[in-house]
Image (cartoon, rainbow, N blue to C red):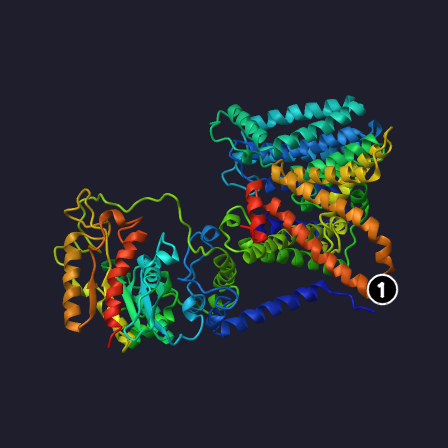
């Protein structure tokens, strides 16, 4: 995300703050967020795709609402304004093709207006059909979950993404020779999928509160958190949304602090560290063990400042429009063990996986007819969860290795703390502090070594760097 | 009880602070900032000046701050060792070493040769080349480098660096207007001190906002010190590049002159002389650097991309005459290197050709090091 776009978001959020104190915030956020979906989407070489992918984001959000909202809550009268606003926006953006000037709202000129209108009519018909007749049961909700996961797999598996790109290029009468997995960069899909899966699963288990179409869509595509999270929960988000926007001096101060901190972390610290961070090129160029560690430390710090900087910006922007997004980072590199690290690094992601994968899997394994021994359950669930988180970042061998590294690390820490907990508690305070400091140092280095898999594309390169780090190459 | 924060007051105070900082910065001469460097302290000094147009690959960048350039160079690592015979090699991109690793450049090959001066001191050559063609740029660097106590200057030159109208075109020259004006005044050079090419920032250009790019470049230069130390890489080495041109059109003009006579007044011999004067008692070895003598189409009219034969031949005659008149230490090595030993330009040599050149230059260094 560019600094210019962030400043545009800031201006938009500021205007929303000043203009919607007496009402109208929900629809203002709906319009801003829908526009942001298009503005954030990078240009793609497949003709029209950088318009259709944001449109698909909106369509998935609307479908998500239809499938997760009880029949009696899907009244047309109450939800028509949101539906019409979204359709109108898509049409209006499509019509910008007819303007002489190029607007910064879409990455490239939208497809022909007739095509946009046709797709809009078809989408509206589909949504209307589901809206009117769908009675979401296990099958439909399960199908929606399956569809989201299938899309995810296509986007993240390079071979599938390339094949999909070739297919889309063929439809567009473009050369398939130059098809690339990068053609399908769907901005924000990961976070969109997390939010939709959360609502679909909670609907399946009957825990999801009923919300309006506007509330649901704003939750799913909320512009400050669209590209990099945090991943909020619908019930918490809508509680903020329904609360009148009261913004006092303390809010201004906190908003300013988060925005300044975020911009500094991202655009000064992280961007400077990026110049000297470990990457696929310099991994093979570095000449000594000492400098290999420097590059690795730089990467570890860069990824933290980059991501936590974005989070600060998202939280600051969110607060400006009255939404208190959840925290994502809490000094993770200072935590004394790996379990605490993961409780404080990308917290909303780990909470999501805990709620929708780790806990259900643990319950299933423990309540099996022939339950596994507890250590085996812990090993299986920790490793499976972390490998899944790795695969979320990308379906490559290195992300699997990264997941295994952390899964095994968490298991080892779990077993270690199980054995040493009593002894640790009996130690005097000073000794506990010293052990915690040593633990933090050890944990940081374990995590940093894990980043070797994360930063590099191939296991062979990672192995070379490991050898270099330990003076063996 | 804490006092409530007024956002308006915070913004007004921040704006005032921002304004004051900018004005103070503009009033202060920040040129000394370039001298603050992590090189030669945290990181080893660079073997050649920072220069690069693809920082992500070369871990290097071009900047105009001469203090920063010198501070990042290994030349300024510390006091001159007593057993060192210090040779400074100035010049253009062929000296800096486009497509060559630091050890493959002329200075690098001189060091590898393990030369000894007459008095037994070890010859240590420093690469002070910079990739633009302008004698004034060379003079600018030489004038500053004299404080680093050289024992000998090696100055490879080529005709393309001589035209008077190109002297101020180098960004390094244009962005160091005050220093260049001082040189013009000091050596009474035939250059216009009010030439619009010499850019002097106005008051607003000297504020923090106006100077943000040079300041960011300084920070980036320090950070790239990590990569220089870690990898020893300071330029990108493409596996493939377009070779030096060997076929030409029938155009025989040079620097707007159609021939057949090269106007000596159009060449900055006064700048060359100023360099010799700036060196004072330190001997200067002037080298007419090797260039590509093309065997290709229209090579009867042109030696290479840069030079029609008539212009270059007359330039060589002028150089020989000046050298004889001024008792210069002069080596004319124009055709030392065969045509297949050039890389991407008519003056960029392969490592093997650099070794050949270093051999010839080394012989002269040996002679000049003797009283």
Name the spot of residue B184 as percent of width and height, x first. Answer: 30, 73
Q: Along the line of sight, which residue is nearer the eye, B81 or A230? A: B81
> Seen in the image, is B209 located left or right of residue A340?
left
Q: Residues within 10 Å of mark 1 (few under 14, many from 20)?
A: few
Residue drawn at 55 percent across, 46 percent down: A464
Residue drawn at 57 percent across, 26 percent down: A115
Number of dots carrying numbers: 1
Name the spot of residue B149 as percent of width and height, x first. Answer: 35, 75
- Residue A31 appears in the figure: no
When the figure is inspected, residue A329 is found, relative to residue B365, above or below; the finding is above
- The residue that label 1 is drawn on is A428
> Seen in the image, is A229 located left or right of residue B162?
right
Residue drawn at 76 percent across, 32 percent down: A65
When the figure is inspected, residue A121 is found, relative to residue A420, above or below; the finding is above
Q: Along the line of sight, which residue is nearer the eye, A392 or A81? A: A392
Q: Residue furthest left?
A: B260
In the picture, residue A85 is in which quadrant? top right
Name the spot of residue A469 as percent of width and height, x first. Answer: 58, 52
> Seen in the image, is A460 located left or right of residue B332?
right
In the picture, residue A207 is in which quadrant? top right
Label 1: chain letter: A
> Seen in the image, is A179 located left or right of residue A254?
left
When the figure is inspected, residue A86 is found, relative to residue B68, above or below; the finding is above
Q: Along the line of sight, which residue is nearer the eye, A106 or A366? A: A366
Q: Along the line of sight, which residue is nearer the eye, A217 or B85? A: B85
Name the spot of residue A9 as percent of width and height, x first. Answer: 64, 49
- Residue A260 appears in the figure: yes
In the picture, residue A149 is in which quadrant? top right
Disc 1 is placed on an element classified as loop
């Amino acid at each position: 995300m560019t600094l210019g776009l962030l400043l545009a978001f800031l201006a938009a959020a500021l205007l929303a703050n000043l203009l919607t104190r007496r009402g109208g915030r929900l629809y203002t956020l709906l319009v801003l967020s829908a526009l942001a979906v298009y503005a954030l989407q990078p240009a793609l070489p497949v003709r029209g795709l950088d318009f259709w992918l944001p449109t698909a984001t909106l369509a998935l959000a609307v479908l998500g609402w239809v499938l997760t909202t009880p029949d009696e809550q899907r009244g047309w009268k109450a939800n028509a304004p949101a539906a019409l606003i979204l359709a109108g926006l898509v049409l209006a953006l499509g019509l910008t093709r007819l303007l002489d000037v190029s607007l910064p709202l879409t990455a490239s000129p939208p497809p022909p207006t007739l095509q946009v209108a046709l797709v809009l009519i078809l989408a509206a018909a589909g949504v209307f059909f589901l809206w009117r007749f769908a009675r979401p049961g296990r099958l439909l909700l399960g199908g929606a979950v399956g569809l989201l996961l299938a899309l995810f797999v296509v986007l993240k598996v390079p071979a599938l993404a390339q094949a999909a790109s070739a297919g889309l290029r063929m439809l567009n009468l473009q050369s398939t020779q130059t098809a690339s997995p990068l053609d399908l960069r769907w901005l924000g899909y990961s976070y969109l999928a997390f939010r939709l899966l959360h609502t679909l699963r909670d609907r399946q288990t009957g825990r999801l509160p009923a919300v309006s179409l506007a509330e649901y869509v704003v939750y799913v595509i909320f512009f400050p958190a669209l590209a990099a999270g945090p991943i909020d929960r619908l019930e918490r988000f809508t509680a903020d949304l329904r609360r009148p926007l009261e913004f006092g001096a303390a809010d201004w101060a906190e908003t300013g602090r988060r925005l300044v901190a975020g911009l500094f972390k991202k655009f000064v610290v992280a961007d400077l560290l990026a110049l000297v961070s470990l990457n696929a090129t310099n991994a093979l160029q570095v000449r000594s063990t000492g400098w290999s560690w420097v590059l690795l430390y730089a990467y570890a710090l860069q990824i933290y400042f980059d991501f936590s900087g974005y989070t600060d910006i998202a939280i600051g922007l969110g607060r400006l429009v009255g939404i208190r997004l959840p925290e994502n980072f809490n000094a993770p590199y200072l935590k004394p063990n790996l379990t605490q690290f993961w409780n404080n690094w990308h917290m909303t992601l780990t909470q999501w996986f805990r709620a929708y994968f780790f806990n259900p899997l643990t319950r299933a394994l423990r309540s099996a007819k022939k339950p596994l021994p507890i250590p085996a359950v812990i090993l299986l669930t920790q490793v499976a969860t972390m490998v899944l988180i790795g695969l979320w970042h990308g379906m490559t061998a290195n992300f699997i290795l990264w997941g295994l590294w952390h899964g095994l690390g968490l298991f080892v820490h779990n077993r270690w703390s199980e054995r040493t907990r009593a002894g640790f508690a009996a130690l005097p305070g000073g000794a506990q502090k010293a052990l915690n400091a040593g633990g933090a140092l050890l944990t940081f280095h374990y995590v940093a070594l894990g980043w070797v898999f994360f930063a590099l594309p191939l296991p062979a390169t990672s192995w070379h760097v490991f050898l270099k780090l330990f003076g063996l190459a | 009880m804490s006092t409530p924060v007024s956002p308006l007051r915070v913004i007004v105070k921040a704006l005032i602070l921002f304004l004051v900082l900018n004005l103070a910065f503009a009033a202060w001469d920040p040129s000394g900032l370039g001298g603050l460097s992590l090189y030669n302290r945290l990181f080893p000094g660079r073997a050649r000046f920072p220069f690069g147009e693809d920082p992500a690959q070369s871990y290097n960048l071009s900047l105009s701050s001469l203090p920063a350039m010198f501070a990042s160079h290994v030349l300024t690592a510390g006091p001159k060792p007593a057993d060192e015979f210090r040779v400074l090699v100035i010049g253009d991109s062929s000296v800096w070493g486009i497509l060559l690793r630091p050890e493959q450049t002329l200075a690098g090959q001189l060091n590898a040769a393990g030369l000894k001066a007459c008095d037994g001191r070890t010859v240590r050559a420093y690469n002070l080349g910079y990739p633009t063609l302008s004698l004034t740029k060379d003079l600018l660097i030489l004038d500053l480098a004299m404080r680093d106590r050289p024992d000998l200057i090696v100055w490879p030159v080529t005709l393309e660096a001589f035209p008077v109208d190109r002297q101020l075109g180098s960004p390094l020259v244009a962005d160091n207007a005050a220093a260049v004006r001082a040189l013009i005044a000091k050596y009474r050079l035939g250059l216009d001190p009010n030439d619009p090419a010499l850019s002097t920032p106005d008051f607003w250009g000297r504020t923090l906002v106006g100077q943000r790019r040079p300041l960011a470049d300084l920070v980036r230069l320090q950070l790239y010190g990590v990569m220089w130390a870690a990898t020893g890489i300071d330029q990108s080495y493409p596996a493939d590049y377009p070779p030096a041109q060997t076929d030409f059109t029938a155009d025989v003009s040079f620097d707007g002159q159609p021939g057949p006579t090269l106007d000596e007044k159009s060449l900055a011999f006064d700048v060359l002389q100023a360099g010799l004067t700036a060196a004072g008692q330190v001997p200067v070895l002037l080298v007419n650097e090797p260039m590509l003598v093309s065997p290709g189409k229209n090579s009867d009219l042109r030696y290479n991309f840069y030079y029609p034969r008539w212009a270059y031949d007359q330039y060589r005659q002028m150089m020989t005459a000046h050298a004889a008149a001024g008792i210069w230490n002069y080596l004319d090595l124009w055709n030392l290197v065969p045509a297949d030993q050039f890389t991407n330009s008519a003056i960029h040599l392969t490592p093997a050709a650099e070794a050949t050149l270093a051999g010839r230059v080394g012989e002269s260094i040996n002679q000049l090091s003797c009283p």
